Amino acid sequence: MQLTDRKKVVVKKEMSFMEKLYLPAILNGMSITIKHLFKRSSTIKYPEQKREIAEVYRGQHVLKRDENGAERCTACGLCAVACPAEAITMRSEERRQGEENLYREEKYAATYEINMLRCIFCGLCEEACPKEAIFLTDRIVPTEFKRNEFIYGKDKLVEPVGQPVDVTCRQTKEVLSFKKDKTKYHNQTFKDQQLLEGSQNH
Ligand code: SF4
Ligand code: SF4
């Protein structure tokens, strides 16, 4: 199958005296370089200079905590299944008694890793997540010198306690109002469930 109709016939001809001097070719090259010096550069000096990015830019992921600081992820694996780059791996564990303040659901991700070299920042993991646990943010993944430094574990992905990463620009109004609806099991924390059970038993 022909991919292009551009053709250039290569002819091996003797070099002229001027061509053998290389001077005209050097001058021609220099003039092109000098012309570019006065053109507006399309590159920027990152990280000193930062390019303006869209509000919904898809950069480094965050694993969210709920309003009580418990990790939202339940290690269901849907994000890993949805990921076209097979960049996500995880290992689940069952929540033990007394860990309700650490993990929102009965099962949690003991390890959760994203290979940032594989990730294509498509956002499908975010769309697949039923627990509003993973979001892409406007943070740019920094450069590293070693490949294994691009494997991001929970230490880099889970948001720090008390320092929530704002992801509201990545959620629609409908999702935000749905998340406030405590009648939905999806939105109930362990405390909410205990309160509900208590009120039903009385
Ligand atoms: S953004 Fe896309 S490629 Fe990256 S981890 Fe999520 S689903 Fe995979
Ligand atoms: S981030 Fe969401 S989709 Fe992925 S394992 Fe956790 S709860 Fe499931």
Image (cartoon, rainbow, N blue to C red):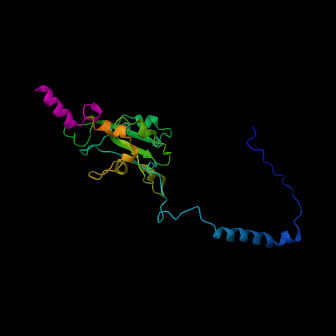
Which residue in the rendered view is the most extreme toward the left?
202
Residue 25 x, y percent position in the rendering: 78, 69
Residue 180 x, y percent position in the rendering: 28, 38
Q: Report whether 19 appears left or right of 99.
A: right
Q: Which span is picked out in magenta?
A: 182-202
Residue 6 appears in the picture as rendered: yes
Residue 102 x, y percent position in the rendering: 25, 43
Which residue in the rendered view is the most extreme toward the top?
201
Q: Report whether 79 appears left or right of 105.
A: right
Which residue occupies the foreground of this view, 52 or 120? 52
- Note whether 15 is above or below 99 in the view shown: below
Indicate the quadrant where residue 72 lies.
top left
Q: Main secondary structure of the magenta part?
A: helix
Which residue in the rendered view is the most extreme toward the front?
173
The residue at 29%/53% (across/down) is 163
The residue at 49%/43% (across/down) is 122
Residue 14 x, y percent position in the rendering: 89, 63
Which residue occupies the foreground of this view, 25 or 148? 25
Could you tell me which quadrant the N terminus lies in?
Answer: top right
Indicate the quadrant where residue 107 lies.
top left
Which residue occupies the foreground of this view, 19 or 189? 189
Q: How many marks?
A: 0
Q: Is residue 53 magenta?
A: no
Q: Is residue 184 magenta?
A: yes
Which residue occupies the foreground of this view, 131 or 111? 131
Residue 62 appears in the picture as rendered: no
Could you tell me which quadrant the C terminus lies in?
Answer: top left
The residue at 52%/65% (across/down) is 45
The residue at 18%/31% (across/down) is 196
